[in-house]
Image (tube, grey):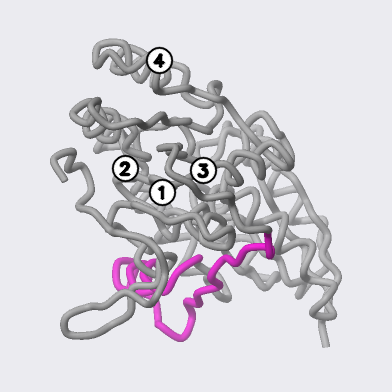
Amino acid sequence: MTTSVRFVVPAGIRDSSRPSGGNVYDLELHQVFPELGWTSHLLPVDGAWPRPSDADRRSLARTLDNLPDDSVVLLDGLVACGVPEVMETAANRLRLVILVHLPLADETGLDPAVARELDAAERRSLQCAYAVVTTSAHTAAKIAAHHGLSALKVHAAVPGAHEEPEAALGYGGDLLCVASLTPRKGHPTLIKALSSLTDLPWHLRLVGSLEQDPAHVIRLRSLIDEAGLASRVLLVGACVGAELDAAYRTADLLVLPSHEETYGMVITEALSRAVPVYASHVGGVPEALGLVAGDPPALRERPGRLLPPGDSDV
């Protein structure tokens, strides 16, 4: 029986200046494989994924060509889903499993033509995979339906969180948003909503890399200044490890105003510390917060509230 997996991930997965939920998930998965009796070989690949150069495509193809026949190869979808021609060739002799963190066309702000191109590439890549893994049941069902995949082929592996000390909750109005500073995360909606609450004692820390989308960061700073919130809203930059733990420890509320989320790992991280959550009702967020099926839907006994995405008047 095969007990070894080659795990293909984007290079820079350990770059602490540009952390992401996807990178955290990949690294945690890599570390847990030995506990399941599997050996995991991490294979970082360079490239501007999901739209790499021809040289990067050839490099990925060579990496896969060098693997033994019938190898189990787990590929981060950011790498795999944009290069269907590489996946189709590799699938002839390797058992490919593609891990989809976010469907490529769901990224906010894409040119419609680019979104269609990425969507078509993703469909081809997923159809030749041995199996597909997503981070929520919502995303699994969405991908299976959208790309015409058998539900038996698509699986959900929901993120977890390490057990952490509870936050020192109080009434200081310490709001925390842990999310990449990109359009999909909906920060402008949050800024607009808070601009109408200046009579309340709050301050907000935005945790996220300032380098991933510098133009968007400039727009955010402008919105914050125009709203007169410069003294209340702090762009902290990227935080990992003890620094991120400290941010959670002093937070009174986690806010996540995303336009789309396949799951929302930061919600799980906040709840593990007993920090309540306000988040957009999108994608897999209800799963992360604990929304269960019913008529009407009901929340499990977890602290949090789901809000309409893009609505600053709630």
Q: Nearer the viewer, mark 4 or mark 2?
A: 4
Q: Quadrant of the N terminus?
A: bottom right
Tag 3: amino acid: Ala
Quadrant of res 258: top left
- Residue 155 sits inside the magenta stretch: yes
Task: Indicate the position of residue 270 as horizontal and vertical percent values.
Answer: 53, 55
N-terminal of the pair, mark 2 or mark 1, is 1
Frontmost of labels 3 and 1 is: 3
Q: Residue at x 47, y 65 (%)?
A: 126
Residue placed most toward the observer, 140 or 193:
193
Whether label 1 touches label 4, CB < 8 Å: no
* Disc 3 + disc 4, Cβ < 8 Å: no
Type of residue at label 2? Ala
Do the numbered discs 2 and 1 sit on residues whose CB atoms are within 8 Å?
yes
Gap in Å between the C-alphas at discs 2 and 3? 36 Å
Span shown in magenta: 135-164
| Residue drawn at (77%, 63%) of the image | 6
CA distance for labels 2 and 1: 7 Å
Read off the residue under disc 2: 115
Q: Residues within 10 Å of mark 1 (few under 14, many from 20)?
A: many
Give the alpha-carbon distance from disc 1 to disc 4, as whole Å: 36 Å
Residue holding disc 4: 231
Q: Mark 4 packing: few (<14 Cα in 10 Å), some, or many (20+)?
A: few
The residue closer to the viewer here, 276 or 52, is: 276
Residue 104: mark: 1
- How far separated are the C-alphas under marks 3 and 1? 32 Å
Q: Label 3 belongs to which residue?
A: 251
The first of marks 3 and 4 along the sequence is: 4
| Residue 221 higher or lower than 104, as above or below | above
Q: Is residue 87 magenta?
A: no
* Element type where label 2 sits in the image: helix
